[in-house]
Amino acid sequence: MKPIALLIITLLIVSCKSPEARRPETVQSGSFIKASAERNIKLNKKEHAIIQNIMNNNPDIDYVASESGFWYYYNTKVEQDTITPGFGDTVNFNYDVRDLNEQLIYSEEELNVQEYIMDKEEIFTGLREGLKLMKPGETVTFLFPSQKAYGYYGDTNRIGTNVPLKCKVTVNTIIQNQ
């Protein structure tokens, strides 16, 4: 073989080699996630203690613990067996938002009447889960720990980071999805 042909074949073979994968510059051990989880556990305990104190200071109110991790009581309870909203149902409701010190954040008038299609639109977790418990004509006051409200990010307006909320909600109508 001629030296030029040998050189070309060698260059072709060498140039076909794929580049080596880059190694990560730093390796995290998961300590950040562990620390974050510990902070969240402490925050949750603190908020639950505050909510428990509110309930203890109001023994005349019959608070109910939800399976979802918030508390509520009925201002107006509908005793007859009627519908509660399911997936895709339209819920017409009014509500206000306060912090746990009763400071008004959003008034019912400011928020206007809401129309929410159950589980198909964005609404904070606690309110979505709370609406599922309600019947038309009921008014319920909910105590939401921050992770059931707007959590770490807040609402980017008036609700800050990790703020537990108190919401008084009235369901006006429920239109069932056919």
Image (cartoon, helix red, strand yellow):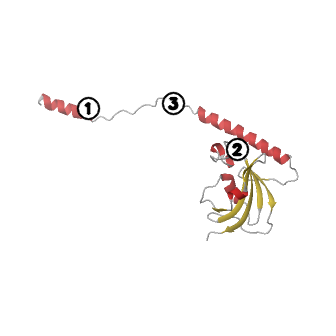
**Furthest residue toward right:** 60
Side of 31 where 102 appears, left or right: right
Residue 109 position by quadrant = bottom right
Q: Amino acid at mark 3?
A: Val
Q: Which mark is residue 163?
A: 2
Which residue position is annotated with label 3?
27
Q: Between marks 1 and 3, how big is the CA–CA gap? A: 32 Å
Q: Which residue in the protein does label 1 denote?
A: 14
Q: Mark 2 is on which residue type?
A: Val
Mark 2 secondary-structure assignment: loop
x then y, percent, for residue 63: 81, 53
Q: Secondary structure at mark 1?
A: helix
Image location (x, y in percent) of residue 24: 46, 31
Judge the density around disc 1: few (<14), some (14-19), many (≥20) Cα neighbours within 10 Å. few
Determine the residue positioned at 68% across, 64% down.
Answer: 92
Instruction: Point out the image quarter for the N terminus.
Output: top left
Q: Nearer the viewer, mark 1 or mark 3?
A: 3
Q: CA distance from mark 3 to mark 2?
A: 34 Å
Q: Position of residue 67 (x, y in %)?
A: 72, 53
Location of residue 134 by image quarter:
bottom right
Left or right: residue 141 versus residue 151 is: right
Quarter placement of the C terminus: bottom right
Label 3 neighbour load within 10 Å: few <14, some 14-19, many 20+: few
Mark 1 touching mark 3, by CB under 8 A? no
The residue mark sitting in front, 3 or 2, is 2
Residue at image x 72%, y 66%? 172
Sequence-wise first label, 2 or 1: 1
- Sequence-wise, the earlier of marks 3 and 2 is 3
